[in-house]
Image: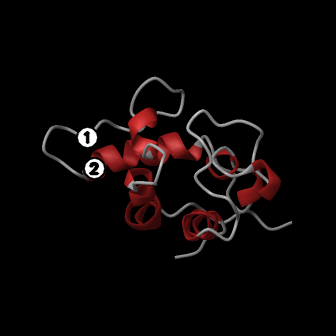
């Protein structure tokens, strides 16, 4: 059996991490809840900044690594928690359902990263 692909930090920083800041109609951005009060913790953005610097991004990368299985998007909590249950997600996510299907472009970006995509 082949080893899973390594998780690429630059792909995370430029393609995955921005998803945490995306606004969604009727739902909070991932960052709002996950910068405080949850076990999955993103680095807080300092006043006046709209994105993380490299050191903060590396800490976010390490936090995310605990929630994913390289090579296996369907086994990765980062993708199953905010996914609708009837699309393969878990029964409950306090922040709501960000994706109704695995075809959602954001879901696909993260899944591609986990599969080793650039």
Q: Nearer the viewer, residue 1 or 60?
A: 60
Depicted 13 relative to depicted 49: above or below = below
| Residue with the most extreme front position | 26
The residue most toward the bottom is: 118
User: What residue does disc 2 label?
Assistant: 52
Quick one: SS at disc 2? loop
Task: Answer with left or right where residue 40 lies relative to residue 72.
Answer: left
- How crowded pointer 1 is (Cα within 10 Å; few <14, some 14-19, many 20+) is rated as some
Disc 1 + disc 2, Cβ < 8 Å: yes
**Which of 90 and 5 lies nearest the eye of the viewer?**
90
Q: Is residue 76 left or right of residue 33?
A: right
> How many numbered tags mark residues here?
2
Which residue is found at the position 48% from the left and 45% from the top? 27
* Residue 5 vertical position relative to residue 76 in the rendered view, above or below: below
Q: Which element carries disc 1, helix, strand or loop?
A: loop
**Crowdedness of circle 2 by 10 Å Cα count: few (<14), some, many (20+)?**
some
């Amino acid at each position: 059996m082949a080893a899973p692909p390594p998780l690429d930090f630059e792909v995370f920083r430029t393609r995955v991490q921005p998803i945490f800041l995306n606004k969604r109609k009727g739902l909070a951005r991932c960052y709002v809840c996950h910068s405080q009060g949850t076990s999955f913790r993103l680095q807080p953005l300092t006043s006046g900044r709209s994105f993380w610097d490299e050191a903060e991004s590396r800490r976010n990368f390490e936090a995310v690594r605990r929630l994913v299985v390289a090579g296996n998007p369907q086994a990765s909590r980062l993708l199953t928690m905010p996914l609708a249950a009837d699309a393969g997600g878990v029964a409950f996510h306090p922040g709501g359902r960000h994706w109704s299907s695995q075809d959602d472009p954001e879901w696909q970006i993260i899944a591609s990263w986990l599969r080793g995509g650039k």
